[in-house]
Image: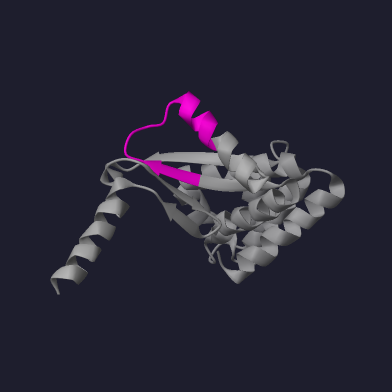
């Protein structure tokens, strides 16, 4: 996330909090961000400097008015006018970080060799919630390279309890002994 995205996303969050619309705008931000991912030509159009800013903002107005909150629409117009519409994903990240902080939510990615069933997913979420004292938003991913166990990624840290990590540790120990 760029510094610009952090500032813009944080400012949008402050406004949404003042208006009591943090959850509504977060959901709409996700929807718009998904739309931009699915239609990169739309973002390209909005970022085209040869089109006057008023026309680019008019496109946003035509496509999104009455579909998203007016604050979010105006936010998108500001990004468009400033040539930073391509940083929407970073703005969303900054907004969500602030939202999570205010609501005691911790995003955790669990990486396993095979998919976790609902029971295991629930047990992991509950245990992490007990340990951290926060609500856990769990994102489960599969990576066969893990071989077994689980790797947890949260707040820029990684707790690696996979078989792959254990095998690598044993290999390093054996190399130290051999040398």
Residue depicted at 50% across the width and 59% down the height: 157
- In the rendered image, the vertical position of residue 175 relative to residue 103, given as above or below: below
Is 79 covered by the magenta stretch? no
Outermost residue to the front? 177
Quadrant of the image occupied by residue 177: bottom left
Q: In what quadrant of the picture does the C terminus appear?
A: bottom left
Q: In what quadrant of the picture does the N terminus appear?
A: bottom right
Nearest the viewer among 143 and 119 is 119
Residue depicted at 34% across the width and 47% down the height: 162
Is 118 covered by the magenta stretch? yes
The stretch in magenta equals 109-124
Numbered disc total: 0
Nearest the viewer among 92 and 127 is 127
Residue depicted at 58% across the width and 56% down the height: 88
Percent x, y for residue 4?
A: 63, 69
Left or right: 140, with 148 as reference point: right
The answer to whether any part of residue 141 appears in the image is yes
Nearest the viewer among 16 and 109 is 109
Outermost residue to the left? 178
Percent x, y for residue 87?
A: 56, 60
Percent x, y for residue 133?
A: 68, 45
Percent x, y for residue 78?
A: 69, 60
Residue depicted at 73% across the width and 39% down the height: 24
The answer to whether any part of residue 31 appears in the image is no
Outermost residue to the bottom? 179
Colour treatment of the image? one colour
Left or right: 40, with 105 as reference point: left
Quadrant of the image occupied by residue 63: top right
């Amino acid at each position: 996330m760029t510094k610009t995205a952090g500032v813009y996303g944080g400012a949008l969050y402050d406004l949404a909090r003042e208006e009591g619309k943090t959850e509504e705008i977060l959901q709409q931000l996700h929807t718009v961000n998904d739309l931009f991912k699915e239609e990169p030509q739309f973002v390209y159009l909005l970022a085209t400097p040869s089109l006057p800013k008023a026309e680019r903002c008019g496109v946003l107005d035509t496509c999104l008015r009455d579909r998203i909150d007016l604050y979010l629409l105006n936010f998108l117009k500001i990004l468009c006018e400033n040539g930073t519409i391509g940083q929407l994903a970073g703005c969303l990240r900054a907004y969500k970080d602030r939202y999570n902080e205010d609501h005691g939510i911790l995003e955790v990615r669990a990486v396993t060799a095979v998919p976790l069933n609902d029971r295991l997913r629930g047990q992991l979420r509950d245990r992490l919630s007990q340990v951290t004292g926060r609500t856990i938003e769990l994102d489960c991913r599969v990576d066969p390279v893990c071989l077994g166990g689980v790797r947890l990624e949260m707040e820029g840290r990684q707790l690696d309890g996979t078989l792959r990590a254990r095998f690598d540790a044993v290999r390093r120990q054996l190399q130290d002994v051999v040398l």
